[in-house]
Amino acid sequence: MPRLLLLLPTRTYRAHDFLEAAERLGVDVVVGSERKQALADLVPGKTLALDFYNPKAATQTIVSFAQDYPLDGVLAVDDDTTILGAMAAKALDLPHNSGSSVAATRNKHRMRMLLSQAGLLSPPFSLFDIDDDPVQAAQQVPFPCVVKPLCLSASRGVMRANDPEQFVSAFQRLGTLLQAPDVVERGDPLARQILVEGYIPGVEVALEGLLVKGELTVLAVFDKPDPLDGPYFEETLYITPSRLPEAVQQDMAQCTARAARAIGLKEGPVHAELRVNDYGAWLIEMAARSIGGLCSRTLRFGTGMSLEEVILLQAMGADIGSHTRDRLAAGVMMLPIPHHGILRSVHGRGAAVRVPNIESLEITMPLGQEVIPLPEGAQYLGFLFARAETPERVEAALREAHQQLSFVIETMHGACG
């Protein structure tokens, strides 16, 4: 039985789907996480405790482990593990991306420089330190602009500013966020820097792809029907297949492939965020991993294969067969957090799942937990899934089901935003 090391942070949404996919494929999985598993000593060779913030030391741990338990593949699931995944795969002489290419996807300024140098459409951009004077910085940037951290994901800390006053407020707010304990504990020097980009108008989409020896295969293109104009950029709806013209989708695919080459990515899943306007396709972000959260559950391939199965097969060097997506349209709504507080109860679940074309509802936020909206927050209340004959029906079902839900959130004193 082939053996694969799956790098799974304990807080990831993705563990269940990847482990279930591995079981269906008959792949022996070793779970690498940042904490030692309770039963690790009783099941040797099944788990591995790794320091994700020290990838060099973690790579040495993996290499030592592989001497006793040979590995046929290494797969990073979330952003925090992609650099380690690349380093470990290289050390084990397995197909891999270079460490520098993956590091570029984790450094928004470095990625923007590479894309600009390669001639891709790119907004003006500037780099600042959190201790810089925001009033002076405001004199050096275009308006409208987007203020963003270098090292965070899922739109956390990303804010639009239309004038100097809004810029100063956003700059200071992001500086405070970058000094939050959960950010500081990573010890990432990028957490002291702020990237400012010219705002790119247009329609935003997401592209899910797979790289094999540098060649990109597009697995899915997702429309984002809700406008993402700011001041924050909270994603809600993902609908596939895209309703954009085929020529526009081809332009997005070519932009993504060029961006991957510019960054240096060659192997494995990529998740790209793009904007499209009259000038063409602009790459906003690219991650050396698959789509986040539980959103992959919208995708089925061939005879019902999940995205995780496709990715696992490719990571093991196997033939992944057909990439043809299921004929039905599908979509997900990432349930937004309306305000800061403590989640006390959720009402309307039954009514929501009874809406025609709704496939399932997952409330992922535990009751009694503090919930924080963007731009400070990094989680959703849960996920709604729908499948239907057309994208329009999927979107309508998700919106109707969301209206059936209500969340009781007890307001906290000193709430963010």
Image (spheres, rainbow, N blue to C red):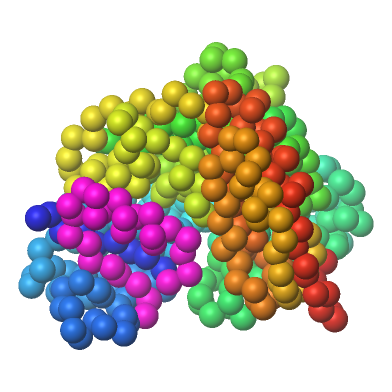
Q: Is residue 47 left or right of residue 399?
A: left
Return the residue nearer the eye: 80 or 193.
80
Q: Residue at 23%, 66% (x, y): give it.
A: 30
Give coordinates of residue 414: x percent, y percent: 84, 79
Please tell me whether residue 22 belongs to the stretch shown in magenta: yes
Quadrant into which the C terminus falls: bottom right
Q: Is residue 337 left or right of residue 39?
A: right
Give coordinates of residue 240: x percent, y percent: 54, 31
Quadrant into which the N terminus falls: bottom left
Q: Residue at 83%, 43% (x, y): give it.
A: 143
Q: Reply above or below: 45 against 145.
A: below
Give coordinates of residue 221: x percent, y percent: 51, 30
Return the residue nearer the eye: 261 or 309.
309
The answer to whether residue 329 is visible is yes
Chain part drawn in magenta: 10-35
Q: Residue at 18%, 54% (x, y): give it.
A: 27
Q: Reply above or below: 153 against 272.
A: below
Q: Is residue 412 left or right of residue 321?
A: right
Give coordinates of residue 352: x percent, y percent: 67, 48
Q: Count the labels in the image.
A: 0
Please tell me whether residue 337 belongs to the stretch shown in magenta: no
The quarter holding residue 376 reads bottom right
The answer to whether residue 195 is visible is no
Q: Residue at 59%, 60% (x, y): give it.
A: 363
The quarter holding residue 358 reads top right
